[in-house]
Amino acid sequence: MRAYLERARRAVEEWRSRHPRAGAAVTLAVRTTKSAVRVRIIGLAAESAFFALLSLPALLLGLIGTLGHLRSVLGQGTVLEIRAWILDLATTALTAQTVDRVVAPLVDDFLRGAQGGILSLTFLVSLWSGSRAMNVFIESITIAYGLSEVRGYFRQRALAFIGYLGGLLFALVVLPVLVAGPNLVRDLLPMAGDYLHLAYWPVVGLLSLTCLLALYTLSVPVRTPLWRHLPGSVVAMVVLLLGSVLLRVYLDASFGQVTIYGSLAAPIAILAWFYVMALAVLIGSLLNAEIDAMWPTATTAEARAEIAARRHARATRLVRRHEEALRTVVERGDARKDEDEIAEEAEASEAEEVLERIGGDADGAARGPAGAAPAEEADSDAAQIPAAGGPGEEEPGDASPGNEGEPRTEEPDVPTQRPVRGSEADGGGRPGADPLVSRKGE
């Protein structure tokens, strides 16, 4: 298997050497795929879609309230057309009865400016959730470029907030044009009314491409040329269009005549579209990042070099701290080892002293309490035993005067002395006779 993979790798390298442009395109696609897996693009797209959906109701209410204050600038007819467009959009997600009883009165109140407190609260909520979704895009693009340490957290959050406000202003300008623009053009140029639908979607696509270019340029921490972000923007637009078509087919098949989702079908569809949009934006940003990694600009290469030097210095400090901590542990271990050795030596000396003391006591017990020889102890014991023949009679086994203080020795020629009973001594067994007599005394 390894040999087969090696042959395949060599074949690919040979093909890339023969076709450099196609090989570079394949390498770029492979690197983009690996980068998408590394940055967890699926989860990031889901996170961004969730926060975008969370900010949508508050965003719409905030836009409606802002349009109500711009009634004199936009005109009454434009505001009414925007109102009808919003109600038609709400009908796709809610029932007609809910739209008539809840949504329409609320929209009218916001357009009249009668819900100032609610407008302020909903606008703040939309700013938080929308800026959170924008922060996901900015953070993902920054990580894809490998420049996550250039911009701090608070700067990034402030940038996301400013970017979201810019998107709101852009929506305030573009939304009336998209809603009322065709009618205005038809009124001003009646001859162009038949061809107006042909230019509508190209204009929408151009505006979307402009938004993507602005987002990619704003998200990169260093200054880069605008045209460097054009490939990713085009790819993002293509992915968004294809994803929208496939999503429309899927939704028609799933939510056709009968659906098990009921009133949740429209929110699910909106969430799915936000997910496709976020996925397209992230794929385009990863493509731009890999293009910059393969053919970097001077600013991005310098920024990456600074980050690499900073990381190397940080790693060096960590290694130095680790070595110092290890050295401290070793020194403490040696000191503790010396203390243990000293304690063991003290215990050994104490044990030797105890053994010597025990040995001395044993020798003293063997010599007696006064240090006398065993022969003297035997003489004193023998002197206490009364003789059978009276005071002048010699005791059996008594030592000679010249041998006092010396241990007794038995001569082999001397007959063995033994105790005899009184009956054996006098033949009659008289009472009162000494039972211990020696043959020498007889």
Image (tube, grey):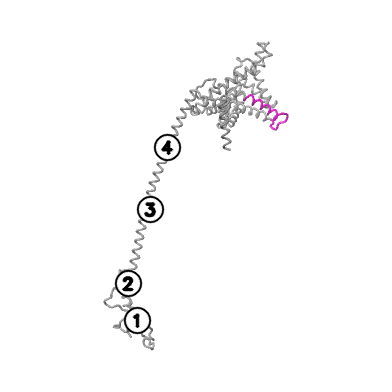
The mark nearer the N terminus, 2 or 3, is 3
Instruction: Decide: few, some or many residues near mark 2? Use Cα within 10 Å; few <14, some 14-19, many ≥20.
Output: some
Give SS at disc 3.
Answer: helix
Residue 128 visible? The answer is no
Residue nearer the viewer, 60 or 311: 311
Q: Amino acid at mark 4?
A: Arg
The mark nearer the N terminus, 2 or 1, is 2
Magenta span includes 242: yes
The quarter holding residue 330 reads: top left
Q: Residues under labels 1 and 3: Cα distance?
A: 61 Å
* Residue range highlighted in magenta: 239-262
> Does 213 appear above or below 335?
above
Q: Which mark is residue 321?
A: 4
Give SS at disc 1.
Answer: loop
Residue marked by disc 2: 374
State whether the magenta stretch is mostly helix, strand or loop: helix
Residue marked by disc 1: 415
Q: Residues under labels 2 and 4: Cα distance?
A: 76 Å
